[in-house]
Amino acid sequence: MRARLKDVAERAGVSIKTVSNVVNGHPHVSAATRARVEAAIAELSYRPNLSARNLRSGRSGVVALAVPDLDNPYFAELATHVISAADQRGWTVLVDQTQGDPGKERLVVGGIRSHLIDGLLFSPLALTHRDLTGREDHTPMVLLGERVGRRAPYDHVGIDNVAAARAATLHLAERGRRRIAALGAQRAPSAATARLRLKGYRQALAACGLAADPSLIAHAPAWHRTGGAEAMAALLGPDAPDAVFCFNDALALGALRTLLSRGYRVPEDVMVMGFDDIEDGRFATPSLSTVSPGKALIAESAVSLLADRLAGATDGPREVRVPHRLTPRESSPYGEFP
Amino acid sequence: MRARLKDVAERAGVSIKTVSNVVNGHPHVSAATRARVEAAIAELSYRPNLSARNLRSGRSGVVALAVPDLDNPYFAELATHVISAADQRGWTVLVDQTQGDPGKERLVVGGIRSHLIDGLLFSPLALTHRDLTGREDHTPMVLLGERVGRRAPYDHVGIDNVAAARAATLHLAERGRRRIAALGAQRAPSAATARLRLKGYRQALAACGLAADPSLIAHAPAWHRTGGAEAMAALLGPDAPDAVFCFNDALALGALRTLLSRGYRVPEDVMVMGFDDIEDGRFATPSLSTVSPGKALIAESAVSLLADRLAGATDGPREVRVPHRLTPRESSPYGEFP
DNA sequence: GAAAGTCGTTACAGCGTTGTAAACCGGGCC
DNA sequence: GGCCCGGTTTACAACGCTGTAACGACTTTC
């Protein structure tokens, strides 16, 4: 059986509380006592029972990160950064996969893990404003990604999707492209990210005086490679685009695959632009131009916001906008392509 | 403040224990009482305090999954499967990233989270036999990936790396390749996986009567795309190989990138074979031939072994060997390449 | 009609920890 | 010598939950 405070106390010949004080680094313990207790701790290889400590303190040192899917490289990379940032604060991260399923997402905000976790970092996909305002659980929560609803009373970390999408589209137009497609539109009312990126795309077209041809907008219900490959296939034909702005890198990699396997040259015939800057894109051939959203900074900001809440901050919801950067690579290079 | 059993009990006019019995679905509660209690639970939106329950029961319902790095698509995909399998048993998964750092790995086996978790699924990289045999923590643990040491007293799930590597290499030889390189060798004494895959590679060469040219063995300290790209560059030159067996898909994607950007045609000039069957490989151009290790089955087996241990199984360590499958794609197609 | 079940419910203790408040001890001061 | 004061240590209760054992009421059995 594992050693308890009681066992250590008996061995060191002190009270339980003194051991507790040593373990927690409280002052007012004489050097001699401390040494004796520490020896006993080592001999019994004592380790605090976290469940008991949590019960007593109301804190668990665990935060949950809820994402749609770790399979998705963007979320996998984000998770890495979140885990590192949490680690630096001595927290442990528990990962929940929602699969973008509204039911599962509601369970998560509803507090399915509430007594186990001190806080929640949540990247929702299908959540509606109603789900948030009616929230009964009071575990501090920070939202990642798109803002849900107008004025949800929660801290939020995101990027300026409209500006980023506009920059990405402009980049293609500046390279002389005239039939620029958008790939990844979604009809679901909760698809805020898709809507914002589409908006930026349209703004860019308008700014360049390009017509907004509806046949150049390809829908993709899920932002996976497969969806990108299929949507790209639908865009090809007599009036094929000469550039595609894909709403994330997975879509772009799928699109790239379709283009290359059908004999299109990238970037000569069709330029491709992604979004997210996942590792795969850097090693694709041609390497993928993309928008880099600063994942490390997103993770760090989110963890930091949560830390403030856990420390008791009660001011109104805060909005953090992390800067993004355009990262052109071979799929839309500088230089001329007449 | 959040409702407790006591609050529910008062509201329903019954004892605390009766509420507990309802919550836990115990029999011997009359329908009328149960209904009353359930109503009270709903009204107060009561949710059990897991810390208290854990303290009482000694179980937390949380298992840890320790992997080197979620960035790595193989581990990200594995984690997805583990989380799903754990979810089906009502467990929550907490992810630890070790970065393959021996110190961190030792902390994990040493039980850094021990009171928080019921069990541990561990995919070690740098762990030695000594670390395992001297283990003081008694949290049930299942090892994933390569066997550590000869007879570590722990359940283990893995694949037959030698056979898989042999099959992969033979596949290249059968397509007429004669200068087959191996990419991903490692010198570290703990690099068991690399050693086994190299062994399979050598067996295949011997079986085909091909000479084992040491200049065809490329080392890669870390199995990332970058490492693969660099190692591939080192292999090229006057005596370039006509096929490369990469010890994982990330290496292969890096190698592919180097080959294509230097003007080599894949598979015509150089065939490429990977290992792991990660999603990226399917969408590369050309798509990547690989060995599919049955990640879902690995995850399910591991979780199932752990479940047995948690249920009290005390028989000797079990060894599960999950079947693998060769998945040829465009980078080493069927058909002739003289 | 009394003894022996059966079912539904309850009181109590204790899981391992920590905050509170009080006790203890030795030294310096009047 | 007695008193006060500071640092050090302790006893106790409580965090919310569940297993155990026991209780009361009601039914069955001979």
Image (tube, coloured by chain):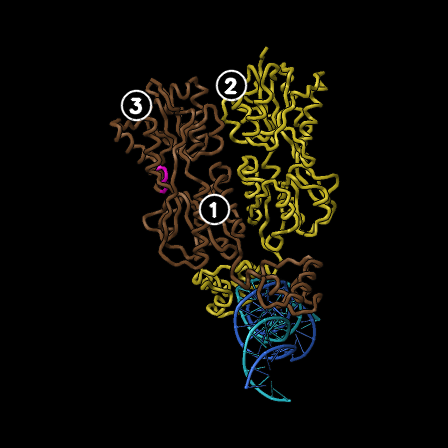
Chain colours: A brown, B yellow, C blue, D cyan
| Chain part drawn in magenta | A190-194
**Tag of residue B279:** none
* Protein chain holding label 3: A
Q: Which residue is drawn at 47% across and 23% down?
A: A285
| Residues tagged 1 and 3 counted as in contact (Cβ below 8 A) | no
Q: Is residue B146 above or below residue A42?
A: above
Which element is circle 2 on?
A: loop
Where's residue B261, x and y in %? 50, 20
Q: In which quarter of the image is the N terminus of chain B?
A: bottom left
- Residue A4 in sight: yes
Q: Mark 3 points at which residue?
A: A178
Question: Disc 2 versus disc 1: distance between alpha carbons?
Answer: 42 Å
Which element is circle 1 on?
A: strand
Quarter-of-image position of residue B244: top right
Which amino acid type is shown beneath numbered disc 2?
A: Arg
Most common secondary structure along the magenta stretch = helix
* Protein chain holding label 1: A
Crowdedness near tag 1: few (<14), some (14–19) or many (≥20) residues, C-alpha within 10 Å: many
Question: Disc 3 versus disc 2: distance between alpha carbons?
Answer: 31 Å
Q: Name the residue under label 2.
A: B262
Determine if the magenta segment contains residue A192. Answer: yes
Q: Name the residue under label 1.
A: A66
Where's residue B319, x and y in %? 70, 39
Crowdedness near tag 3: few (<14), some (14–19) or many (≥20) residues, C-alpha within 10 Å: some
Say which label, 1 or 3, has the lower sequence index: 1
Closest to the observer: A331 or A223? A331
